[in-house]
Amino acid sequence: MTSRFIEALLAAETPVIMEIKARDAAGTDLTDGRSPADLASAYETAGAPCLSVVTGRWFGGDRDMLRAVAARTDLPILQKDFITSDADLERARDLGASAVLLTAALLSAGTLASRIDRCLAVGLTPFVEVVSEGEIQTVTHVADCVIAVNNKDIRDRETGAADIGRSLSLLPAVRATGTRCPVSASGITTPEIAATLLDAGYAGLLIGTGLLRAPSLTTWRDALAEGRR
Ligand SMILES: O=P(O)(O)OC[C@@H](O)[C@@H](O)c1c[nH]c2ccccc12
């Protein structure tokens, strides 16, 4: 099965999934008055191959954000929320998502496998977030999934500090699954950290707060390109 989301990410000059999120985990506003659609346009102009929209309530999100972004752009969109049923998956697709978040830490291996099956059956790319080697082993249909190492912990609602070292140490295990699309997500605050992760071998990154707080997206993107070996 081909995935528009994965193909776009792998073909990109700046392989960064740029995230639209209303608030950070501490509740601080990240939009500075910009609408989700305007952020989508700004990211597209900065060369984003794919977007992520956080619709989860913890982060001040809702489904209207996804609707508004899908109406503004044709870029493939990841919906980040806590998907709890098959009906949620179909709704994600109908709202315009190309990919959905599945959090391995919150699902049993059996439930994760059936959610992955269901995603693929309805034409969605599973974006599976993992935080340990054990979770990496539970991912099925690896060739059709994005495997994303989360540098933060969803179990503490992402309020703790990010551990970029987790991405670096888990990369061999992620690669050993045979995925084409290892991604590092969360807590990538500077272009220098982003460059380090891409140079280490990550095919893509997912960045929200760092970009939402950046004074200039093009400066951030150019610093990332310059920082690479
Ligand atoms: O803003 P950051 O630190 O760049 O992180 C982005 C993204 O990884 C984060 O928003 C996230 C990771 N897992 C989630 C689960 C639900 C909602 C959001 C998330």
Image (spheres, rainbow, N blue to C red):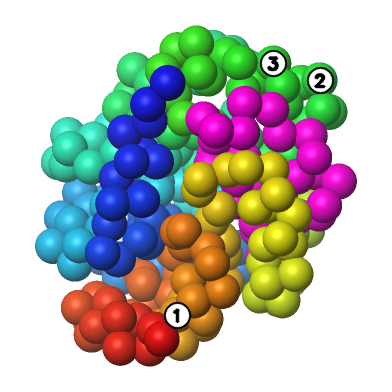
Q: What segment carries the magenta color?
A: 127-151
Residue count near mark 1 (Cα–Cα under 10 Å), binned few <14, some 14–19, many ≥20: many
Looking at marks 2 and 1 on the same chain, the residue that comes earlier in the sequence is marked by 2
The residue that mark 3 highlights is 114
Q: Is residue 114 above or below residue 212?
A: above
Q: What residue appears at the point 65 percent right and 53 percent down from the top-left corner?
A: 175
Under mark 2, the amino acid is Gly
Relative image position of residue 95 (x, y in whole percent): 33, 24
The residue that mark 2 highlights is 110
Does residue 2 appear to the left or right of 132 in the view shown?
left
SS under mark 2: helix
Relative image position of residue 152 (x, y in whole percent): 69, 64
Under mark 3, the amino acid is Ser
Relative image position of residue 147 (x, y in whole percent): 60, 45
Q: CA distance from mark 2 to mark 1?
A: 36 Å
Q: What residue appears at the point 61 percent right and 68 percent down from the top-left corner?
A: 26
Observer-nearest residue: 4 or 67?
A: 4
SS under mark 3: helix
The residue that mark 1 highlights is 195
